[in-house]
Amino acid sequence: MNNQKALRELTLRGMILGALITVIFTASNVYLGLKVGMTFASSIPAAVISMAVLKMFKGSNILENNMVQTQASSAGTLSSVIFVLPALLMMGYWQDFPFWQTLLICVSGGILGVIFTVPLRNVMVVKSDLPYPEGVAAAEILKAGDEAGKESGVKEIMAGGIIAAVVSFLTNGLRIITDGASLWFKGGAAIFQIPMGFSFALLGAGYLVGMMGGIAMLVGTLFTWGAAVPYFTATTPMPADMGIADFAMSLWKSKVRFIGVGVIGIAAIWTLLVLMKPMIQGMSQSFRALKDKNNINLDRTSQDLSPKAMIYTILGSTVLIIIALVSFLQPVGLPTSTTFLFVVLCTLLAVLIGFLVAAASGYMAGLVGSSSSPISGIGIISIVLISLVLIVVGHSLGLMDSKDGQRFLTALTIFTSAIVFCVATISNDNLQDLKTGYLVHATPWRQQFALIIGCIVGALVITPVLEILYHAYGFAGAMPREGMDVSQALSAPQATLMMTISNGIFSDNLEWTYIFVGIGFGLSLIIIDTLLKKSSQGRLALPTLAVGIGIYLPPVVNVPLIIGALLSWLIQRHLRHYAKRSGKDISELNKKAERFGTLFAAGLIVGESLIGVIMAFIIAASVTSGGSDAPLALELADWDSMAEILGLVAFIIGIAIFTRRVLKAKKA
């Protein structure tokens, strides 16, 4: 490695390009996360765009492209703070997103996420056999793009993006097609639903999740709408003034969803237990790294940020957390001593819990990939731990004796958990990026610095995008103006979950019965998953977390995800048969198909999400000038049925185009 040709890595043009990509993908991920409760890993599309752009400049190389994707990858991770923060608006504690508080949460948590995983690089990346699926895929794409005559793949992103953008504009802009449809019917007293969703972003996300995750989500969906909801609707009297769809959905929200919470929670706890050994290894490695005085003398490809730089960065991030907490607590009017106590306590909780989840999140990303990593479970555990600590303090200070006190403690829990969430999500991403860097022989400390820059740029974007989306669409249970179209509200499912759990803990009215049912169901699924993996030598699995998500998310969200996963499996199956008939190398076919599919799927996600953000700006401008919440909508009479048919037709055509683009692998 010492004789490796010196190549430019961290360049000004690369940092500017990385910042621009970060802005675009952060906005996309914020919208997607608020709409359906999930984000996409942006490393691979960022690498492709970087290669396409930097090829126009002299002297670009694989290491410079790697730095751009490292910086831009923060967009797919730091934006996950929206899984927690909107809960403060849903509970009425905030009326908008304060810029400086939100910025400080994202910057401090994101930078800590980078620093906490630096000492884990050696034990979890260099000396580990963890697969790091997205990290390896990004490295392969960078290597392929570095070879002369190879297509960068930007055409696939553009094709997917244009298709999804056009359909999204027809859906959310002109509103002449719908993004879903449901058939409701009764069997005796039980109510059943056959749902269908037409979202291209979710189709792409499902393709990336893969078949095992898709089957698990299907199991969760069938359990919910084929067993649990029919049972509750058959055994609960239906109000005379309520339709069957509204009645079934109300029981799903108040009962069945909490079963999903239990499944997600126990899946996260089980994962942490499984990861306890590597977590301890990682922490011991951290302390050894702080004593290492010879980092500067190591080979370039083995140099991390220096221990001194790490200590100063942690102290600086801790100061930012303190400033954020003081700003959050100041309007409450607590005594100075009480404010001081909460600032110290919540800072310690954020830093210590953040350090613990960093190792777990990084390991999970290495095991199953950033997109499939159960960050929601980490969020639930953080909320519960912080809630329990603050309940004890709240009782000693008398704050638990009033509803206002309970509301304040709930808000403080969510605020502190948002910092932990930023630590977890960036930890989830950093080791994935370091794996890519390891495979292309990058300099680790430069990657770590690039990701810190990405965190700062992403944090600057998140607040204004959140503000625009909130005032344009509103969130479930939090509408900024009267008379807004509730059907267009962003569901923010993860934030709703975090608010429900923290609210329920402090007010002591959480639906523990259904959560315990979910825990029991989750334990059964863990046993089944373990047996499946053992009997099939790892070829088959039933990811417990994905089953829980299938129960928790709305059915119109689950269906396109499942279809995307099924599409991935059908294409792989077709390629296996084609390879047998033609004598071609199946591994090479799969590699090309995976590349085409990943990039097209990323294009679908970005295209739909960006139109959602652009429409939010248009709606916000219209409302500000006294106009409509749907300024571009064509008000067509008796159009509902036709809109559903057109939505289905567009979705089928999109699937056909998607399949054709991926099967180009046979000719490439």
Image (tube, rainbow, N blue to C red):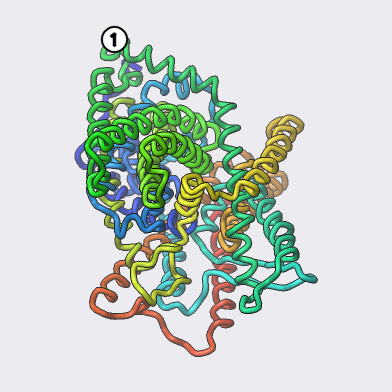
Determine crowd level at label 1: few under 14, some 14-19, many 20+ residues with C-alpha closer than 10 A. few
Residue 418 versus residue 292 in the image, above or below: below
Residue at image location 40% in from the left, 80% down from the top:
633
For mark 1, what is the residue?
294
State the SS at label 1: loop
Residue 18 versus residue 396 in the image, above or below: below
Residue 179: horizontal and vertical position, in percent? Answer: 52, 69
Report the side of 455 relative to 171 (left or right): left
Q: Residue furthest left?
A: 12
Residue 329: horizontal and vertical position, in percent? Answer: 26, 44
Residue at image location 55% in from the left, 82% down from the top:
640
Q: Is residue 46 at all visible to an observer of this figure?
A: no
Residue at image location 29% in from the left, 32% down from the top:
341
Q: Is residue 238 at all visible to an observer of this figure?
A: yes
Report the side of 417 relative to 23 (left or right): right
Residue 255 versus residue 185 in the image, above or below: above
Residue 567: horizontal and vertical position, in percent? Answer: 62, 55
- Which image quarter is the N terminus in? top left
Residue 372: horizontal and vertical position, in percent? Answer: 53, 42
538 or 572, nearer to the observer: 538
608 or 344, nearer to the observer: 344
Residue type at mark 1 is Asn
Q: Residue furthest right?
A: 188
Q: Quadrant of residue 540?
A: top right
313 or 540, nearer to the observer: 313
